[in-house]
Amino acid sequence: MTNYTVKLTTLTPLHIGDGTDLRNNFDYIVQGDRTYRLNTDTILEAFFEKAMQPKRNGIYLTPGELLAENTANATAQADYIRYHMPGVPRSGKTFAELKSFIKDVNDRPYVPGSSLKGALRTAVAWGGLPELNQRLQRSDFGRSKSWAGQGVERTLFGSNPNKNLFRALQVSDLSGTDAAGARLSVVNAQVLTRREVGSPIELEAIAGDAVFTGTLKIDDTLFTAQAERVLRFNNRKHWLTELPQRVQAHSKERIEKLANWFANAEGATRAAKFYRQLAAAKVPANMALLQLGWGSGWDGKTFGSRISADSQLFEHVIRQHRLQRRPRSAPPRRAGAAFPSSRRVAVQNDNVIAPFGWCLLQLTKVE
């Protein structure tokens, strides 16, 4: 087994969701410039009788309302607050939504190993296509969006899950701190096109300059001569041992295109400058720039430029899988139009401040 320590440092706000939308006055409350995540079970247990009594309009009190009516200083009651963080959602309406960051049972945010492994797999697949002289075709993407490209992946990585190259790669979850809610903040996000910003989205996100650590292992037993006769990995172990270089090559290609996209988007000067800085960065051999989580975009999760290099194939994939979302009143997509046409960004006072999810990955071999 070849072992590595993993260090992941966030460069821009990172959001990896747990699939939960938190609701104002039910899951959280706002006081001043901070947002407080409520312990709803404790609140309902403490004020059960009042919770069961509807108001005159027939509506029951929310946990936030119960707390406000029965405590002098709600946010000082540790039993009722799970954690708190800087920043507030823009909407103060009851049941306004805030997307939750993934956390462990003690409310400590972490980066799932599956999220990191998925990003590594994307980069390796992107780099592996030209090495195998594999040419993408329409038949590779089928009719189902869920199964698109799986034929190509079988060629790259193995004929089935039991014979998949990435079986040899084991990535742990990455932890950051022992404190509940640590390094989380409320980030205001919007969808940005080159001409305008779209509707607001509120997120729990990890701020920049946070560090997460874990382990990565390569199972060497799957690359022996005996294993090769069964698994047929065809001497592709170097695809895994060269992970930082391969991830960096994929990211560099994306960064150059993203720098150009943001340079031509109104009000995105700060984000464009950030991408120019990334493009100019000199990254050591055991490190790589990597985009994770929410906001990575279509090109961060697919074969990206390997598809768009063939304009006819690219247009076919967009049409076949209905990738271009538009209002019914909008005109049909023109062939050759930019895709994707929007990006998810963090904003402050309606100004774009950063893209989401950029991190610096460092792998250190354990001797």
Image (cartoon, helix red, strand yellow):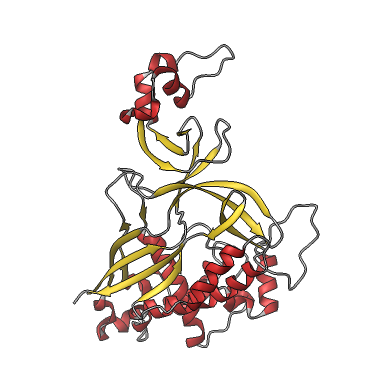
Residue displayed at 42% across by 36% down: 36
Q: Position of residue 3 (x, y in %)?
A: 24, 72
Q: Position of residue 332 (x, y in %)?
A: 79, 62
Q: How many marks?
A: 0
Asked if residue 195 lies left or right of residue 168, the reply is right
- Pick the quarter of the image with the N terminus: bottom left
Name above or below for residue 179 compared with residue 296. Answer: above
Q: Quadrant of residue 338?
A: bottom right
Q: Position of residue 191 (x, y in %)?
A: 62, 55
Name above or below for residue 329 compared with residue 124. Answer: above
Q: Is residue 366 visible?
A: yes
Name above or below for residue 207 compared with residue 93. Answer: below
Residue displayed at 35% across by 36% down: 82
Q: Nearer the viewer, residue 65 or 120?
A: 65
Q: Residue furthest top?
A: 56
Q: Position of residue 267 (x, y in %)?
A: 65, 60
Q: Nearer the viewer, residue 108 or 336?
A: 108
Q: Nearer the viewer, residue 44 or 128?
A: 44
Q: Is residue 303 visible?
A: no
Name above or below for residue 170 compared with residue 57. Answer: below
Residue displayed at 43% across by 14% down: 50
Q: Residue furthest left?
A: 367
- Pick the quarter of the image with the C terminus: bottom left
Residue displayed at 37% across by 32% down: 39
Q: Nearer the viewer, residue 215 or 356?
A: 356
